[in-house]
Each structure stands twice: as C-alpha cells, then as structure tokens.
Amino acid sequence: MSNHSIMVEDTPKNLEAETAVIGAGVVGNSIAFHLAERGQDVLVVDKNYPLSGTSGSTQAWVWVHTKTPASYSELSMLSAMLYPGLKRRIGDVEYLRTGGLSPIFDSVDLERAKRLQESHGKRGIEIRILNSDEVRHMEPNLSRKVIGATFSPIDGNVNPLRLVDAYRRAALRHGARYSLYNPVTDIKEGNEAFTILTQKSTIRAKHIVLAAGIWSEHIGKMLNVNIPVRPVRGQILVTEPVQPLLKYTMSGMRQTQNGEMLIGYSKEEAGFDRRTTLKVIQQTVQMAMQYVPKLRNVKLVRSFSGLRVMPKDELPILGDVPGHPGLYIAAMHSGYTLSPLVGTVMTDLIVDGEPSIPIDEYRIGRFW
C-alpha cells in the first residue's frame, strides 16, 4: 500500500500529536495540509470520512464578487488568488477561473449592483455592470428578461471531490495522520496539552483546531466555548449532461466539465435535516427556467442537499480562542472559496504566532 493511502483505521488506544484537527472537510483538510507542509505533526480526527458531510454536498463555487460586506469579498478574493499556486502543490483539482455573472432582472437590483460596484471597487475587486446586450453577448442562452448583470473575472469553480482528496493526499505525503470513523466524545483542557476522548482512543495534543463544520457548536461545548453556528440547508438539482449552455459560473447555477448543470441556492432553516423537498425542487426548477429557458427540455437526474455552516453573523469565525491557549477555530460557510487562505492563515497563526493577514474582524471574541 502506498504512503498516500495510509489511514489510521486500526487506531491505537493512545495517540499524541502536536496539533489535532477535528473535522475532515475541505477546511480541516486544508489546514492539515498546510500544517504538515510546514513540518508540523498533525492528526486529523473525524466521526465519518472526508466528503461525507457538507463538503461533499455543494456546487463548489469559488465565488467572490457579490459577497458582502466588501471586506468579506476581499477575503474571498485573496483566497481565490491562491488557487493557481495551490494546484502546483497538491495536483489538479479542476479549478476553473471562468469569471462570474450575477443576472439582474429589475431596477432595484440594478441600483444595488451600482452600490456593490462602488464599495467593492475600493477593495480592489473588479466588478463590471453589463447591460442586456452585453450579457447576452457573453451568455447567449440567458433569458430575454435579464436586463443586465454584474460580472467579475475572479469568480470560478472547483471539483469538490478532487480538491478534498488532493488536500488529504498531500497532507499524508507530508506526514499527517488520520483517524476516521472516530467520533470525539469529550475534550479535557490541561496546562500543557488537551486530552481528546474518542470512541476508539485517547489523544493528547498541544493544539486543537476545531474545524468540525455544523458540529462546531457541539464540540465547543465540551470546552465551555460558545461557537454560534447553525446548519442552513441548501438543495441542488443535477441535470443530464447537455451541450454547453453556460460559459461562466453564475449565481444559482453552473455547468460542469462533463455537461451536467448544477442548479440551486436555497437557504432553509431546517436544523440537521438533509432531506430534499418537492416544494424547493419546484422553486429551483422555476428559477432555472427563468434564467435559462432552454433548460425547460432538459431532464433532471437527481437532487441532493447539504447543510451550510452558518455563523451567527454569516461571517467566518477564525483564529485562537481567548482564555484557552492552544485552541483554534475555523468555522464558516463558503469553505471551497476560502480553504486555500484559511489553511495558510491558520497555519501561520499556529506555527508563527500571528496570521499573515489581519483577521481581527473574524475572531470569535466579536460575539462575547
């Protein structure tokens, strides 16, 4: 068996690591890779397997230009800019910087787009406002009801399965270890190390990174740390492969390299319920046909849903935890956009003692 596929399946009863990363989604795997690349002893712990949760249920946009506030959009831009270099370090992840379109249907949205262009332009984020002729020149299959669009060249998408697996394989190559199907049951905080109790083992670690996604609040309670996140369900439809209909990544849908259309951007307060619903499927179909009328004759082959990790103010929670030396948090939605930067920043913070960019507005202390 190659070193690339080594996992801690028969987990020893006692394990030690310099840093334990709890959570093997796109964020946890990115942090593990970046730490291991810097020579850190890393152990990733997860109750399931990479891609079994939120990270495996996504359109995987690398999206920047419509995010608000502008500072959050800038954070996303800085992360998107890291993707070309990341590919050279971890391998092909089918990252495409297609540019992103957000269609405009009425004058209210047009005025909002003008304010977005002004605020984001001050942060160096390029946004063009297109008229109807320009939009249809770029995307001929868009509806005649579209009166314009915002466009930015920085937006794109990535293959989520390839990215998470590439992070994991690269982390393994640099010596990281994984303990999967191993739920954390409790965490004890000591003077020099944490003791993580799991179903299979006891783990001692100098540092802990909580990257447990929608389970971050649950894990935080073990340490008496309130992490204000909740799950927000999103449902996505998948069509049969069709001839190219969209050139650009678009808010609400994109076309994959094999021709399938991924459609949907619902936001539902449904707790931990991952079921799809007929009502949202019907609403999503209507949205798709409003955007691209030619989809009317295209067959749907499946639907799925995922649970976004939504912090209380919808902005990332990053950094160390005051009063808990050695404890770090990385909890956010939009993990595919942010994972290259988050892995870099969290590693800089853990290894060097300070992040490479300011993250004060994303620290957990803002909620206390």
Image (cartoon, rainbow, N blue to C red):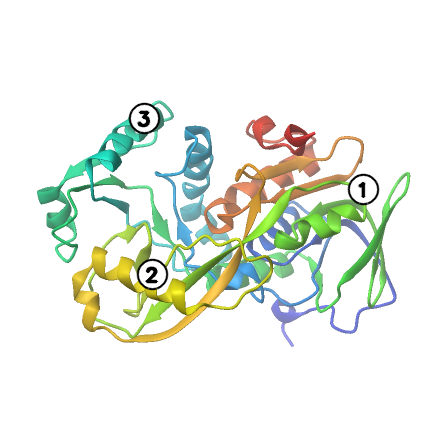
Residue found at x 24% / y 30% = 111
Circle nearer the N terminus (2, 3) = 3
Q: Where is 220 relative to 77, above or below?
A: below
Q: Which residue is mark 3?
A: 121
* Percent position of residue 82, x then y: 45, 43
- In this view of the protein, which residue sits in the foreground, 267 or 77? 267
Residue found at x 74% / y 72% = 9
Q: Is residue 227 left or right of residue 202?
A: left
The quadrant holding residue 296 is bottom left
Q: Which residue is mark 1?
A: 224
Dot 1 crowding, Cα within 10 Å, few <14, some 14–19, many 20+: few
Q: Which residue is mark 2?
A: 283
Task: Look at the numbered discs 2 and 3 and tell me whether their residues touch, using CB distance below 8 Å.
Answer: no
Three-letter code, disc 1 = Asn
Q: CA distance from mark 2 to mark 1?
A: 41 Å
* Percent position of residue 48, x then y: 66, 67
Three-letter code, disc 3 = Gly
Q: Where is 326 relative to 168, above or below?
A: above
* Percent position of residue 23, x then y: 66, 56
